[in-house]
Image (tube, helix red, strand yellow):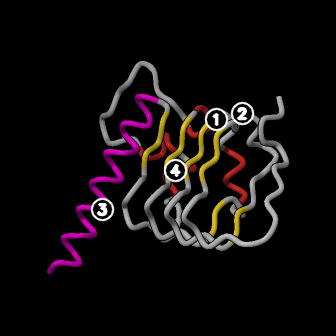
Amino acid sequence: GGAQESALECQAKLSESFRKARQKGLLNLSGLQLVSIPAGAFDLISTCEEGEIQLQMFSTEELTRLDFSYNELTEAGDDSRFERFTACASLRLSHNALRSLVLPDALQALTELDVSHNGLTGVFVAGGLGRR
């Protein structure tokens, strides 16, 4: 039915996004109705398709831009796997349902953070933001 087609379509978009990320070093998972960040984002090499051969391939640790905007995420960063995004300079989390955001110290390269249009309340402490 419709839900199954939608799930397959979403999986196809995910696969395509992961493939592009391995090629270009930027992961765009915007607008996929995600309620959580998929495991493949944290282990990009594991998402390789059978028979895929690339001379140069980006790993999770080499991604420079992450776009998780326009989804249904309620939390981000409190997953310890977020520490793998060590080269990430730009992180987009706008237009989600975030209630909490924890940025690990490992995000030393981060210079741009967009968390607009969320449900965040409280004080934002930019621990490692812009620190080199």
Look at the numbered disc 4 and give the secondary structure of its residue: helix
Residue at the (85%, 48%) spot, across then down: 127
| Disc 2 to disc 1: CB gap under 8 Å | yes
Q: Which residue is mark 2?
A: 109
Residue 7 relative to residue 119: left or right: left
Q: Position of residue 63 (x, y in %)?
A: 56, 35
- Distance (Cα) linking label 2 and label 3: 30 Å
What amino acid type is highlighted by mark number 2? Answer: Ala
Amino acid type shown at disc 3: Cys
Eye-nearest disc, 2 or 3: 2
Q: Secondary structure at mark 1?
A: loop
Q: Quadrant of the C terminus?
A: top right
13 drawn magenta = yes
Q: Which quadrant of the structure image shows residue 80?
A: bottom right
**Magenta region, residue range:** 1-24
- Vertical placement of residue 127 versus 122, above or below: above
Q: Residue at x 31, y 59 (%)?
A: 11
**Horizontal relation, residue 22 to residue 84: left or right:** left
According to the picture, the residue beneath numbered tag 3 turns out to be 10
- Residue 59 rendering spot, x and y as whole percentages: 54, 35
The residue wearing badge 1 is: 89
Q: Tag 3 or tag 4, which sits nearer the N-term?
A: 3
Q: Secondary structure at mark 3?
A: helix
Q: Position of residue 107 (x, y in %)?
A: 74, 42
Circle 1: residue type = Ala
The residue under label 4 is 41
91 displayed left or right of 29: right
